Amino acid sequence: MAQTPIDRAFDDHKPPEQELVDDCVHCGFCLPSCPTYVLWQEEMDSPRGRIVLMGEGLQEGSELTPTMARHFDNCLGCMACVTACPSGVRYDLLLEDTRQQVERRYPRTPSEKLLRRALFETFPHPGRLRATVPLIVAFRRSGMAARLQRSRLLDRLPLARTLSELAPPVALRDAVRRLPAVTPARGERRGTVGFLQGCVQRAYFGDVNAETVAVLAAEGFEVHAPRAPRCCGALGMHAGQEKDSLPLAKATIEAFERFDHVVVNAAGCGSAIKDYGHLLRDDPAWRDRAQAVAAQARDVHELLAAVEPRAERRPVEMKVAYHDACHLAHAQGVRDQPRELLRAIPGLELLEPAEWELCCGSAGIYNLTRPEAAGELGVRKAENLLATGAEAIASANPGCTLQIAAHLQRKGRPLPVVHPVQLLARSIGAGPRPRRRRARRR
């Protein structure tokens, strides 16, 4: 049967819902928290402006123009507007559905297609990422990384500069590090959890995963860390790549639905899993299972803050500035729990940077597809963090960690960037001493 021609910008497969569009009253409370509006003062690059465009895309006779697609692409998906909105507008759900429309219906240029395909053929594959570890180590040891960053050549190649600066501070052992399938609880078991290893987190931040498992075990949880799936689908889901993200979401559901909780230590992954019900809402075979796993998902700070501490906290004398990862603070609403855990560490002084709600510019693949805008936000974030006088930065998302370290380096003031759970592990003596994620000195 021939399909009816589409005479509007969005097709009938999961378009943004008109009811959610109508929830926006255009009050403007979102504007000061929106990174792109703060940078450019452009109405169509604000949440309410993009919601207007979403509404237009639902109208008969509308067209998905290059201008409309550009405004949607400019959005970091940080969800700071969700936190700021007094009307409870679900911009997160609107953006997720809109991005799928753009990726499916907008004809990207060959270079855009090539870049996006290269990213999605690399980052959600931890095995492929691990294969890059020896190359990254050699790149740094050769001194080429430092020479390139001092070179004026990279001033004309923002993507190449970004890739060079974001190269993670890995060691050769990261290529072979593996978590045990099961880690028993210390003392009386208080629950069984499934721990999501992630893709980028597993390949480049294996020490964070190891210490997360050690802390959970010290606090009485039996931790299961299945190797499959390779990725939860977050990167593709947040970029509108439905074909990439759906199989990974289903594999994650199958792997983790038997546990009391699905524990996640990367903000973007936790946000994606909690949105599985929305992603699979039209699939009767998976809808209920997706909603159940979404309800079981817990950020590691969320879980630990909800139970009585067991392990003794010993002093960690350090001034630490806490960076709110957007997909933790805004998309999941987890803001107080990481702070509670850090304040419970004796000797640790917790510092709060200005503009905590503004994105650092990482935002999944944003700092690779929009390096100039991401760079402006990265500099702004680094300056705010440095202004606190901190000796270290705590960040609960791998993309944020790499972005912040890169821009601290640009400022010539490298500081350790660690996961909050690593500081907790140091305090309770669980696991190895964390390897500091410090930007390299030139």
Image: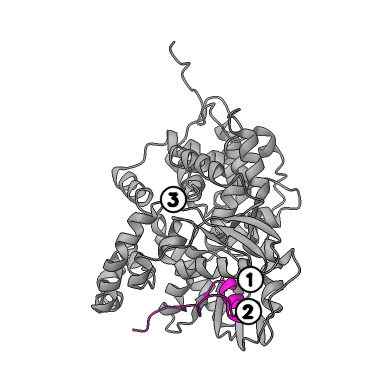
- Callout 2 crowding tier (Cα within 10 Å): few <14, some 14–19, many ≥20: many
Check residue 103 in the rendering and tell me which mark sits there, or answer none.
none
Specify the quadrant of the image occupied by residue 392. Answer: bottom right
Q: Decide if residue 290 is on the left or right side of residue 163.
A: right
Q: Does residue 437 appear in the picture of this structure?
A: yes
First in sequence: mark 1 vs mark 3: 1
State yes or no: discs 2 and 1 in contact (Cβ < 8 Å). Answer: yes
Name which residue lies at 50% across and 42% down.
251
| Amino acid type, label 3 | Arg
- Callout 3 crowding tier (Cα within 10 Å): few <14, some 14–19, many ≥20: many
Residue 128 drawn at (x, y percent): 33, 55
Check residue 230 in the rendering and tell me which mark sits there, or answer none.
3
| Amino acid type, label 1 | Ala
State yes or no: discs 1 and 3 in contact (Cβ < 8 Å). Answer: no
Q: Does residue 29 appear in the picture of this structure?
A: no
The question of residue 430 being in magenta is answered with: yes
Q: Which residue is mark 2?
A: 428
| Amino acid type, label 2 | Ile
State yes or no: discs 2 and 3 in contact (Cβ < 8 Å). Answer: no
Give the magenta range.
418-442
First in sequence: mark 2 vs mark 3: 3
Q: CA distance from mark 2 to mark 3?
A: 30 Å
